[in-house]
Image: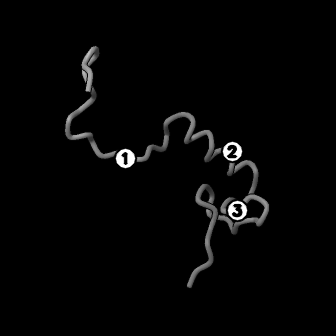
Amino acid sequence: MTSPRCPICGKPPVAEYRPFCSKRCADVDLQRWLSGGYAIPAAEDEHGPSEAGEED
């Protein structure tokens, strides 16, 4: 079994920044989330977005 690696640079993780190896790699990952570099796919609502002015 291989040990986990930093998802940004591949170095061994440091406990303080786990799963990253450094604050820099943790910050790179955070920036990717904040800038839209990463996204979680979502299932489309089968009815789509509700129309403006439409009441349920």
**Three-letter amino acid code at the position of disc 3:** Arg
Color encoding of the figure: one colour
Q: In the displayed orientation, state which residue is furthest to the front.
A: 56
Residue at 63% across, 43% down: 30
**Three-letter amino acid code at the position of disc 2:** Asp
* In-image side of 50 versus 30 (left or right): left
Sequence-wise, the earlier of marks 2 and 1 is: 2
Give the residue number, with chain letter if any, for mark 2: 27
Residue 38 image point, x, y percent: 48, 44
In this picture, is 33 found above or below 18? above
Q: In the displayed orientation, state which residue is furthest to the left.
A: 47
Residue 1 image point, x, y percent: 56, 85
Closer to us: 17 or 47: 47
* In-image side of 2 versus 47 (left or right): right
**Three-letter amino acid code at the position of disc 1:** Pro
Disc 1 residue crowd, few under 14, some 14–19, many 20+, Cα 10 Å: few
| Front tag of 1 and 3 | 1
Q: Quadrant of residue 55?
A: top left
Residue 8 image point, x, y percent: 60, 55
Residue 41: which disc?
A: 1
Disc 2 residue crowd, few under 14, some 14–19, many 20+, Cα 10 Å: few
Give the residue number, with chain letter if any, for mark 3: 18
Sequence-wise, the earlier of marks 3 and 2 is: 3
Residue at 70% across, 66% down: 13
Closer to us: 56 or 37: 56
**Helix, strand or loop status at disc 2:** helix
Residue 10 image point, x, y percent: 62, 63
